[in-house]
Image (cartoon, rainbow, N blue to C red):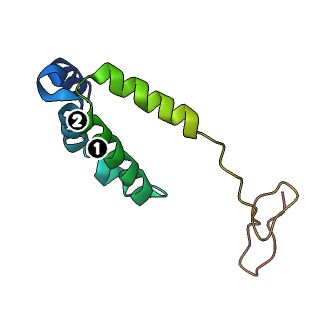
Amino acid sequence: MSDTVQRLRRAVARLGPGGALREAVRELGLEEVLVLLTRGEQRIANVRKLLRMADREPHAEVLLEQATRSRENGARPRPRRSPTKTTRCGCSPCTGARGSRFRW
């Protein structure tokens, strides 16, 4: 992975930010990994949005500033989900073979 990153770092002037990021996504198989995660489709959509932003910006430093500013402005803590059934510690109860709650 570090070989890919180093090679693309040197090539960003030739490829531009969009081209370099697109090449990294392809070589590292990022979409294939993201689809396996929770909210994978949304994560892939976010990567593609970043790639579109990168295609419009010829300077990597400016793109980084824009992405950082966008993240800071849009970042907000995610609400905690409350499980329907909880134990005293707040987690979902484990059940045994007969359906009884797991006891610590």
Q: Quadrant of residue 27?
A: top left
- Numbered tag placed on residue 18 in the rendering: 2
Name the residue tied to disc 1.
Answer: 52
Residue 38 is left or right of residue 33, and the answer is right
Q: Amino acid at mark 2?
A: Gly
Tell which of 104 and 48 is nearer to you: 48
**Residue 89 x/y as whole percent:** 84, 54
| Whether residue 54 is situated above or below residue 104 in the rendered picture | above
Task: Identify which residue is drawn at 84% across, 62% down.
Answer: 87
| Whether residue 98 is situated above or below residue 42 in the rendered picture | below
Q: Amino acid at mark 1?
A: Arg
Task: Identify which residue is drawn at 25% across, 41% down.
Answer: 25
Tell which of 84 and 103 is nearer to you: 84
Question: Given the current orientation, which residue lies at the most extreme right position?
Answer: 88
Residue 56 is left or right of residue 81, and the answer is left
Figure quadrant of the C terminus? bottom right
**Residue 28 x/y as whole percent:** 25, 40
Can residue 66 be seen from the camera position used here? yes
How far apart are the alpha carbons under marks 1 and 2? 7 Å
